[in-house]
Image (cartoon, helix red, strand yellow):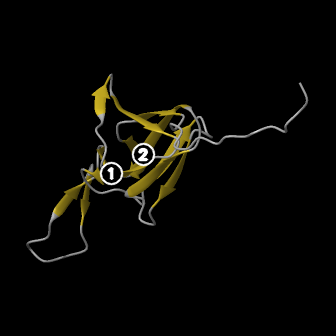
Amino acid sequence: MSGELVDGDCSPHHRRRRWARRLLVFVHHYPAIIREGKIMMSLNTKQKFGVTVIPDGVIDGPPAWAVSPSGIVSLTPTADGLSCEVIALAPGTATVTPSALAGGNPISGLPIAVTVTAAPATTLAETIGPVVSQ
């Protein structure tokens, strides 16, 4: 049974499913560029985006999400681990990587290189100093 998982159905028509070999990565709502084996994303510190992974077979449990370095974006995965919200925190570049285990073997999806820039100003505050003698 190397590399295959048989469902619990013992009928003559039971299905065979294979262990996943990779996670397919889908970015929601933003144009993304794939370059040099990475998904490239750009956003500012007031933006966020969602990502969904779909295993191409059976996985051992929910996917995990990692970011390096920390402090540039935060990750909020759903309970099942199949989706994650990526929220910009500070200017810089970080890499977000989804991963999972399939038959005890580690698998991953394309890493997402996220470049965060400072959000543009939306208001202008004026301060008038005290009146002084000339």
Give, as a three-letter code, the residue at label 2. Pro
State yes or no: discs 2 and 1 in contact (Cβ < 8 Å). yes
N-terminal label among 2 and 1: 1
The quadrant of the image that shows the N terminus is bottom left
Of residues 134 and 104, the one drawn nearer to the viewer in this rendering: 134
Q: Is residue 57 left or right of residue 86?
A: left
For disc 2, the neighbor class at 10 Å (few under 14, some 14 to 19, many from 20) is many
Q: Is residue 94 above or below residue 83?
A: above
Residue pushed farthest top?
A: 36
For label 1, the residue is 53
Q: Position of residue 90 (x, y in %)?
A: 59, 38
Query: Which residue does the numbered mark 2 point to in the structure image?
Result: 98
Amino acid on which disc 1 is placed: Val
Residue 63 in sight here = no
Residue found 13% across the figure and 77% down from its top: 11
- What residue is rendered at 62% in x and 40% in y? 71
For the image, the number of numbered tags is 2
Q: Position of residue 15 (x, y in %)?
A: 15, 66
What is the x, y in percent for residue 23? Answer: 31, 46
Q: CA distance from mark 2 to mark 1?
A: 8 Å
Q: Is residue 25 left or right of residue 126?
A: left
